[in-house]
Each structure stands twice: as C-alpha cells, then as structure tokens.
Image: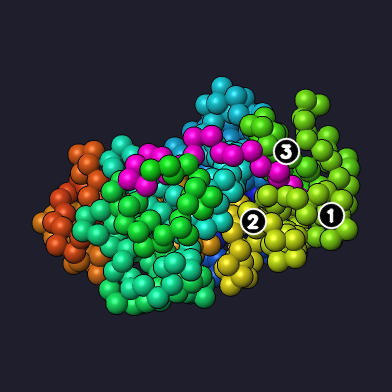
Amino acid sequence: MYVVVVGCGRVGSQLAGFLSEERHYVTVVDRDAGAFKRLKKSFKGGTLVGDALHDDVLVRAGIKQAEGFAAATAFDDTNLAISESATEVFHVPKVVSRLIDPKRERTFARKHIDYVDSTTMISGRIKSQLFQGPDSIVQQDRTEVGIQVIEFGIGDEANGKPAISLNYGISSKLLILLRDNKPVAFDEETPLRRGDRVVMTLRKEGWAIVRECMGSDLDDNTCPGITAYDLASNAVAEEPPSLNVIIGGCSQVGAFLAVHLASEGHKVTLVDEDPSRFKRVPPEFTGGFVEGAIDTEETLIKAGIEKAEAFVAVSKSDESNRGAVELARNVFKVPRVMSRVFEPREETAYQELGMPYTCGTRTTSQALAEKILNPMVRSKSACLFNQYDLVEFECPSAWEGKRVLTARNSARAIFAYVVRRSTGYMSENNFVLREGDTITALVTARKVPKLEKYLLKISR
C-alpha cells in the first residue's frame, strides 16, 4: 500500500517505521523537520516538511495516489480536520485518526472518521491488570467458547513440582514457562520454581488442576473473583475490590484513569509536579491531589504510599515513571504496580525487572496499523511483561487437514487454542485443522510481522 502518515511524534514515527518494515511505501508529513530524527535508520519511505492542514501539502505528499492515511499528531482538532480532507476531498479508501481526548469521540463518530482512542485503550490495559492482582492475570476470557488464557506466578507450594502437574488432558495446557524473566524450554518433568511465570490455556475444569498444583498459593487474593475454581466465568471479578490507588502523573491518561477509578468507588490520589495539570480533572472528582515529583520518596509518602494498595505511573517522562514504580514496588512494597512506557526501547528494561507495564506508543501505532492494513494476524493482548503477544488469525486453506503440530512448527508460533463453529478446542498436537478455524497463538512482538508474511505467502 501507499500510505501517508501525518505527524512524526512517537506514535507517528513508530507507525511509519512499522509500515516501512512491512514493505509498504510511506510518506511522513510534519511541520518540524527535526521530528524526522525519530524515524529509524532502516526507514525507506519519504518525508515532507509542511502543514498538513493545507491541501497542497497533502497533494505534494501524494495523497491522490494514497490507499491509506493516518492522522497521528498530538492534537485532536488537527487530526479531525486532516482526516476529513483525506476522506471527503481526496477519497482515500482507508483513513484512520488518533484520538487523544475521549470527550471528542462523538465528534469523530458523527463525522464518520475511524479512530483509535489511545487514552481509553491505554487506561483499559492498565485497569485490566491492576485489578487482577500481581500474580495472576486472565489474559483472555472466552467463556462463550469455554476457553481461557491465564498467566500466573509459581508460589511456594508448587515449587519443585513437575510441569506436568499443570496439564490435564483437554482441560489445561501449559504453553510458556518464564524463568528469571526469560522463556525456557520445558518438558513434562521440568521442575517448577518459585518465581517462575507461566501462561496456560484452560477449560473451566482446569482451574481445579491449577489449584491442586498451587494449593493455597492460588486464592481469592491471587486471582480475584474465583470462588469456585471449576467455574471459568468467575475468573474475572465482576466487581473489583475497592482499592487505595495513587496515580503518578496527571497526563491525559492519568486524569481519565483517576476519574473512572474514583467513580467506581476507589480511593484515588493524583500526584503531579505541575498543579495546573489538575485542571484536566472535572470538579466532581472525589479524589485527592498532591503536588510534587512522582519519583521522590518525600512526595510519595505525602500522597500516602505507605498505605497504598496500587500505584500507577503515567507521567510523560519514562525516566520518572520507572523511578516511581521502582520506589513503589521495592521500597514501599505496594502490591499492585503498573507503569506507562512511551519509548519502545524502554521495554527491555521493564522486562528485565519483571515490572508490569503497557507501552502506549506501540499499542496505539499497532492499532492504527491494523485499521489501515486489516492484517491476517490481529493482536488481542500482551503476556509476560509484554514479551509475547496473544494474536488471532484464520486458518489458511493450505493447512486444511494438517495437524496442529505441523502447522505450529511451520508458523513458529505457540498455539493456545482453536475455535471452530463457536466451540473452543485445546491445541493438541494431533488436532486436525480445517479451513475457517480461528487460531489463537502466542508469538514475540518482533515475530508478529514474520507470522503475517508467512500466512500471506501460503494463502496466495
């Protein structure tokens, strides 16, 4: 495809780089020539300095020939205006915009502009992990097909037990074993160790197997909402417990998250070194405010960190966010900690620390790319500190009649489960695939494009 991307900030440059790596031709437009320094050296597209609010700049960028258009600036008004031009004036087939302020959602929808609401999406990812506890996360709850994908930490009671303890026929299957924050090869006899993290596929009966292996390590505090471990639908709490939450940074995400958590009955304190940012929060907000740097012990103590049950760092500084979450977890022993990451290159540090986080830049650019390209491989979630993406794709005709083992080895992916006619099936080696099946798999983020290319190749 020929794609025009307007805005070469973190999101725009990440999106342009991804599209270029996928061999699409990309032209990036930005008013600031210095912004193009964010593009990777491997970027093979074009750049144009100019204000995209002027149609002649878009024409010079090649919009008349474009098959895709993305408005990725940091300003909603700009994104809306240029997306309207791309749609109504130049009739680009695929137009998508970044949306920052959720309050503008109706305006975008009314003008029929497709968009990615980055603030709501990032806040949702933070909440989904924050309320499931630090040791157990339901990454996907497909109750309608009788399947779940869960991630949890190995505790004292399971220490030394063989990996096969977590497998039980078609009810539970161990997919990935992470040790010292690195994936390790395992077989049935590989001993589990305290501190390991695992990803599993479960049917509802599988919870009994997991609890038998984990013992009291797996209780309501570890996986909220589970009152009967043989009921998969109870694995995600319908009403999360009320928590004392501190949010570091009154960014757009921080303000949005604070208001929603407070409205759900949580005690929320917002911390920011610039008190003027607190104006982002409406007057009806019931939480508290503390002025100060989020990565200092003095400020955090003033905010009540010693009694906090959850801490979220969502300022616009990666350095401040990382310093803050390390203090919260290591010094003040806050049980639930999450951080927002801007620069994707920072992800490695979080993975090595085993620190929960969400990378808003990568998540937003990935969502924009999916809307433009409509890829075969669709990302659904991120597991094991974002080292693996949980993805979904349709079984290609080339795999008709082939066993899971054969397809899995060809795709170099870990198959989690298969859905056929609204029924979920465990990915047993001898399970025979049919065209039309939907496959959910785990792959590292850098292998997602390779999986897409492979599936396109065998589908021709």
SS class of the residue under badge 2?
Answer: loop
Question: Residue visible at 82% across and 38% down?
Answer: 288
Q: Which residues are magenta?
A: 229-248
Whether residue 132 can be seen here: yes
Q: Report x, y in % for residue 434.
A: 15, 50
- Residue at which label 3 appears: 267
Would residue 134 appear left or right of 172 to someone viewing this image?
A: right
Q: Is residue 51 above or below residue 349?
A: above
Given residues 88 and 230, the one toward you in this image is 230
Residue 362 location in percent, x, y?
56, 56
Distance (Cα) linking label 1 and label 2? 16 Å
- Mark 1 or 2 closer to N-term? 1
Where does the image place residue 210, in percent across and percent down from the top left?
36, 57
Residue extending farthest top? 110
Q: Residue at x 31, y 66 (%)?
A: 165
Residue 61 drawn at (x, y percent) = 59, 49
Q: Amino acid at mark 2?
A: Pro
Whether tag 3 and tag 1 are in contact, CB under 8 A, the answer is: no
Is residue 232 within the magenta segment?
A: yes
The crowding category of the residue bearing disc 1, from other C-alpha atoms within 10 Å (few below 14, some 14 to 19, many at least 20), is few
Decide if residue 16 is in sight here.
no
Q: Which residue is mark 2?
A: 335
Mark 3 closeness class: few <14, some 14–19, many ≥20 residues within 10 Å: some
Left of 138 or right of it: where is 275?
A: right
- Coloration mode: rainbow
Residue 134 magenta: no
Seen at 36% across and 63% down, the residue is: 213
Residue type for callout 1: Ile
In-front residue for pair 312/89: 312
Residue that carries the numbered disc 1 in the rendered image: 301
